Structure formats: structure tokens, C-alpha cells
């Protein structure tokens, strides 16, 4: 059972809980998601099964898109609606121009301090466990990229944004920092991930519909091929000798003119996905970084 499910995670459920449910349905022990969504958030959560767990890194590195509703005037310790109120402010004097000007600071390459209530670790312990124990530690800012930040609507005290960003971006931190920038405080009221790499919420399957499909025996229509997340990589077809070398873990030479700046996805002469190849400049050879062996090719 190898492939990727584009699951629409419901609110009030952890990402781990979604993976556990998928494991029970499929019976596949090798399963993992491609980027945690907070329990209160919903939306696109790709779940990789079987050999697809070996391409998780490509999905984790891909850009994500979110719809966020931020409430001005209230700050919380978790930076979202689940936390305890730490500050109240008056947002009545803030208009759309103030918001647009404040949002400019969050576009492009920025540095962001992760929230204390996060899964990042300090001294081997998750920050959220320290936070629950009343311990606050200094967190270093991290570089992230906001590719697009669009103000969808503003009806005080609620600001709705669409955000396209790099991995590692905390939308809760963005909401919190926006509140400080406006001088009234703010927190993330709701969050939906609408896109993760190539997966869109318009094609995401809910857990009830997935369970129904398993009962009906047609669940495979929701399973995306392993290489569907690698379409951004150049493609190369190998002859039988090259295929045999790759399966044995040996490096191979490719024709002159092959793009040596990127990884390649390699296929057999009859179209089967075989491997991700990495260029070795010292030897001018291509090494099989990840090899995929399917039952038909054993």
C-alpha cells in the first residue's frame, strides 16, 4: 500500500490522531504526515503510506497556504483561541489602512520567534510541556519566508488573511506579532490549511468519506502515486542496464546535457517510477538517493 492520501483534517483532532486513524483503516504500519497542523486547525494534511514515507521531506519542504482569522484586542499565551488571555487592548481605532501597513512587515524573508506552546524541543523536552509547567525559555528567531500575504476582509475586530509561506512558519506567531505591531494585541482565532505543495483542499477527503470508501472497497481512488509530489523534478528514462544498476545501488552516467543542478526522478523504459537520483560532481555520475521497488519489478 504505497501512495499519499490528501486528508482534510477536522478541527479538535491532532495530526497524529489522523495518521492513527489512517493506519487503522489501511493496516499499513508505515504512515506519516507531512507537517503538523495544530489541533484546533483544519485542512490539508497529506498522509504518506508505505514507500511514500520516503518522500515526506519533499512535501515538508513545499510551500503551504492558509486562511487565517485573527482577532484583534486579545492576546493569549498560546497565541490562539485555546490559550489563557494575557492582555486586552482596544482595537476600535484601527482601520484597514493600519492593518495593510502593519502587514508589510510580514512579507518576504522575515525572522520569527516560535511560540512557547509548540512542539519544538529545549533540552530534549517539547516547549509546550515546559509552558504548561509555567516555564518560559528564550527562543531564537528563525528565518521563514512569506511568499504572499493577502488581506481578504476586515470587520473589526476580525482580520481574515490568506498566507502562502515556507515550512516552519507559525501563523500563530504572525497573529501575535501583528497584534503587537498594531498596539492592541491579537490572537489566531481560526486556521485552515488550503494547500500543501501539490495538494489542495478542493481535492481533500474527509475522514468520514475515507472510512465510507474503505467500507465500499473503492478507497484507492483517493490514493495519489508516490511520484506525484516529485513533478517539479526533471524526469529521465533509463535503459535496462541503467535500471539494473540503480536497483543495485550503483551510480550511473547520463547523457551530456542532463541538468546537473537538481535532483532527477528516474523511470524505467516502460514508465515505472524507479528512483530519485542525485548528481555527484566529483565523479560526474548520478547516484540513487532513493530507490523504489514495486512488486511488478521484483
Image: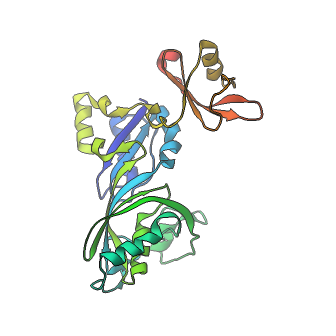
Q: For residue 20, which quarter of the picture?
A: top left
Vertical relation: 55 (above or below) 221: below
Q: For residue 263, which quarter of the picture?
A: top right
For residue 268, say whether it is visible: yes
Q: Position of residue 111 (x, y in %)?
A: 54, 67
Of residue 282 and residue 192, the one placed in the foreground of this image is 282
Report whether 257 appears left or right of 85. right
Vertical relation: 228 (above or below) 163: above
Of residue 164 and residue 222, the one placed in the foreground of this image is 164
Vertical relation: 206 (above or below) 135: above
Q: Residue at x 23, y 40 (%)?
A: 209
| Mark count | 0
Report whether 228 appears left or right of 245. left
Q: Position of residue 79 (x, y in %)?
A: 40, 72
Report whether 198 appears left or right of 159. right
Q: Residue at x 47, y 34 (%)?
A: 231
Q: Position of residue 123 (x, y in %)?
A: 61, 66
For residue 83, say whether it is visible: no
Scheme of colours in the image: rainbow
Amino acid at each position: 500500500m504505497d501512495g499519499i492520501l490528501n486528508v482534510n483534517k477536522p478541527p479538535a483532532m491532532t495530526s497524529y490522531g489522523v495518521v492513527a486513524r489512517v493506519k487503522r483503516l489501511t493496516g499499513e504500519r508505515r504512515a506519516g504526515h507531512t507537517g503538523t497542523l495544530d489541533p484546533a486547525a483544519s485542512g490539508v494534511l497529506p498522509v504518506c503510506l508505505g514507500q511514500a514515507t520516503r518522500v515526506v521531506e519533499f512535501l515538508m519542504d513545499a510551500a503551504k497556504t492558509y486562511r487565517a482569522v485573527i482577532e484583534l484586542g486579545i492576546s493569549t499565551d498560546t497565541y490562539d483561541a485555546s490559550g489563557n488571555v494575557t492582555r486586552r487592548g482596544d482595537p476600535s481605532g484601527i482601520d484597514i489602512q493600519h492593518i495593510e501597513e502593519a502587514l508589510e512587515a510580514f512579507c518576504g524573508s522575515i525572522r520569527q520567534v516560535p511560540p512557547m506552546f509548540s512542539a519544538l524541543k529545549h533540552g530534549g523536552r517539547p516547549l509546550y510541556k515546559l509552558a504548561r509547567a509555567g516555564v518560559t525559555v528564550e527562543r531564537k528567531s528563525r528565518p521563514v519566508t512569506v511568499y504572499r500575504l493577502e488581506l481578504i476582509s476586515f470587520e473589526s475586530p476580525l482580520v481574515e488573511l490568506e498566507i502562502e509561506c515556507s515550512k516552519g512558519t507559525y501563523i500563530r506567531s504572525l497573529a501575535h506579532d501583528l497584534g503587537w505591531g498594531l498596539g492592541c494585541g491579537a490572537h489566531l482565532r481560526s486556521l485552515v490549511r488550503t494547500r500543501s505543495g501539490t495538494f489542495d483542499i478542493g481535492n481533500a477527503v474527509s475522514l468520514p468519506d475515507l472510512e465510507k470508501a474503505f467500507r465500499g472497497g473503492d478507497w484507492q481512488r483517493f490514493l495519489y502515486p508516490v511520484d506525484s509530489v516529485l513533478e517539479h523534478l526533471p524526469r529521465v528514462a533509463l535503459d535496462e542496464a541503467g535500471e539494473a544498476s540503480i536497483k543495485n545501488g550503483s551510480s550511473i552516467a547520463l547523457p551530456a546535457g542532463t541538468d546537473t543542478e537538481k535532483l532527477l526522478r528516474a523511470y524505467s523504459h516502460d514508465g515505472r517510477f524507479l528512483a530519485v537520483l542525485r548528481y555527484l560532481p566529483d565523479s560526474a555520475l548520478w547516484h540513487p538517493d532513493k530507490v523504489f521497488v514495486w512488486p511488478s519489478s521484483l
